[in-house]
Amino acid sequence: MNTILTTQCDDDVGLIAKITGLCHQHNLNITRNNEFVDKDAKRFFMRTELSGVISDDFLPSLAELLPNGAELALHSSEKTKVVLLATKEAHCLGGVLLKQFEKALNIEVLAVIANYADLAPLAAGFGVPFHVVSHEGLSRAEHDQQVGDLIASYQPDIIGLAKYMRILSPEFVARFEGKIINIHHSFLPAFIGAKPYHQAFERGVKIIGATAHFVNNELDEGPIILQDVTHVSHADTAEMMAKMGKDVEKTVFCKALQLASEHKLFINGNRTVVFA
């Protein structure tokens, strides 16, 4: 049986030895290990892949060895449960659904929730439940409450914003803190706002990109998970850049969900620790 142990706590002397030593005492084999120390924040992060049977007292015993407030979790090899939010753009949603169909992502998309019905045929083609929660006639708080209640009914591990073009209320973000992953249409921080590719075209940029990040209450300023770029030239129009940008967005979004599903992401203040 393979299990992933994730650890984050205040840094201290001998943490790796304490964790690996306890694994040895419990007859657990470490098949892969990654660790990182943020020297400025004095925080320790570790991801450990284990084989063997884990007893009920393993985590309590480990907590006694580590600094107070250590955040410990055990994750099975089961697929990560995901709910996707969408509006009208199909590329990110379609990319995730296709990769799930190909079994290229360690996720299970439980449902797609959108504020328009445009993408219902896409979800139906992959046999994924599709729900429309219209924002018409509702305040942002009312709409977020309805969407949040529907999400909660599925009890997902991760919520993916697949080009969901709605600003989330602070109450919604707090309700699903640390679970919401967004894909942004630029190499942040740059060209924030409407028509980013037209802004890029007017500035004559030579690269365009996309950014996946966790969502917080600052618009498009949450902890960055992953970024990628593609090169463009003076011959590319804004429309051509937009098409190329969509490919980057789709790739980065899928990779971010995969990292989350493999428990390789740690939120570290307004930054992230990402183990490859």
Image: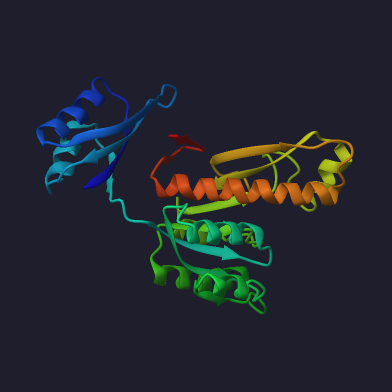
Q: Where is residue 104 in the image (x, y as percent from the top left)?
A: 47, 52
Left of 88 or right of it: where is 13? Answer: left
Residue at (44, 23) in percent of width and height = 40
Choose between 127 and 270: the one closer to the eye: 127
Q: Is residue 217 visible?
A: no
Vertical comparison of 261 with 162: above or below: above
Q: Where is residue 48 in the image (x, y as percent from the top left)?
A: 29, 36
Q: How is the image coloured?
A: rainbow
- Image quarter where the C terminus lies is top left
Q: Looking at the image, which is closer to me, 227 or 115?
A: 227
Q: Residue most toward the front?
A: 102
Q: In this view, does 270 lie above or below 86?
A: above
Residue 67 position within the rendered picture, expressed as x and y whole percent measured from the top left: 24, 31
Is residue 31 depicted above or below 161 in this figure? above
> Does the rendering let one see residue 191?
yes
- Residue drawn at (54%, 76%) of the image: 131
Give the total of numbered labels: 0
> Which residue appears farthest toward the bottom when viewing the image?
137
Q: Is residue 226 left or right of residue 190?
A: left
Residue under the image location 50 percent in, 73 percent down: 127
Q: Tell me residue 234's x, y (percent).
A: 88, 36
